[in-house]
Image (tube, grey):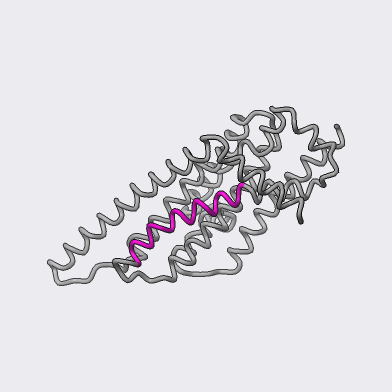
Amino acid sequence: MRTILAITRKEFEQYFASPVAYIVVALFMLLCGVFFYIFLNIYMQTVSQAGAMGQEAGELSQSIVRPFLTNISFFFLMFFPILTMRLLAEEKKMGTYELLMTSPISIPKLVIGKYLGVLSLMVVILLLVALYPVVLIIFGHPDMGPIWTGFLGLFLLGAAFLAVGLFSSSLTDSQIVSAVISFVFFLLFWIINFLSRSDQWYGRLCQYISIYQRFDDFTKGVLNLNDAFYYISFAFFGLFATGIVLQSQRWKS
C-alpha cells in the first residue's frame, strides 16, 4: 500500500511540476463557467417570461444543473486524453520505463498508483466545478438530489474514461499518439450514445452499452446501482487491460 501511495503522490505532483495541469484546469473551468452562465441566463429569461404569463419556471436543478453536468461529461472527451497521455508514454520517451519494468514494483501496484494519481487530479477538478452549483445553493433552492447524484455520476464516468486513457498510454511511447488513441475511444463512446437514440435494433443495443446513456439517469437524481457497477466494471477492465500490456512488455524486457 505504501508503494501505491508513493507512486500516486509522485504522479499527482508531476502534473503541477509543469504548466499542463494549470492550463487544463484553467481551460476546463473557463468552459464550465461559460456554459454555467449560459444556462443560468436562459433560466432567468424563462423565469421572467413565466412570471409575466403567471406561470412557474422549471426547477433549478433540472433547468441548469442537468444540462451543465451533461456538457461537463462532453468536456471529459476533450481534456482527459491530455491528462492521461503522459502517464506511461512519457516514461518510455524519457527512458525511465525500462527501470520500472526491471524494478521490484509489481505491475498491479504500478497501474493502480498511476491511476490514482490522475484520478486525484480529476477529483480536484470536480471540487472546483462544484463551486458553480454552490452559487445556486446560496442564492436559490435547488433540488440537491440531482446535484449529488450528478457529481457521483461524473466521478464514475471520469474514472472509467481515465482507465481507458491509461490503457492508451501503455500502447505507445508517444504522448500525442496516446492522446489521439484515447480521443478516438471517447469519440466512439459518444457516437454509440448518438446511435442509442435510434428506434432501430442497433439503437437498443447501443442504449445498453452506451457509457453516456447511463450517465443521464444520474443527472435526473436517479441512483441506479447497475449503472454504478457498469462504470466500476468499465474502469476495472481498462486497468486490467493496461496490466496485461505492461506484463507482456516486462517479459520482453
Q: Quadrant of the N terminus?
A: bottom right
Q: Which residues are magenta?
A: 118-137
Question: Considering only vertical position in the picture, is 150 above or below 198?
Answer: below
Query: Residue 236: horizontal and vertical position, in percent?
Result: 69, 54
At a point 41% along the width and 70% down the height, the residue shown is: 144
The answer to whether 111 appears left or right of 23 in the picture is right
At a point 55% along the width and 57% down the height, the residue shown is: 155
Kindly give the residue lying farthest to the left in the view shown.
52
At a point 57% along the width and 58% down the height, the residue shown is: 156
Query: Residue 95: horizontal and vertical position, in percent?
Result: 74, 28
Question: Considering only vertical position in the picture, is 205 above or below 247?
Answer: below
The answer to whether 197 appears left or right of 253 in the picture is left
Q: Quadrant of the C terminus?
A: top right
The answer to whether 185 appears left or right of 216 in the picture is right
Query: Residue 70: horizontal and vertical position, in percent?
Result: 43, 54
Q: Is-magenta flag for residue 22?
A: no
Q: Nearer the viewer, residue 200 or 51?
A: 51
| Predominant SS of the magenta segment | helix
Q: Nearer the viewer, residue 132 or 229?
A: 132
Query: Residue 177: horizontal and vertical position, in percent?
Result: 61, 30
Question: Considering only vertical position in the picture, is 248 above or below 215?
Answer: above
**Quadrant hosting residue 53:** bottom left
At a point 65% along the width and 43% down the height, the residue shown is: 11
Q: Nearer the viewer, residue 19 or 252?
A: 19
Tally of marks: 0
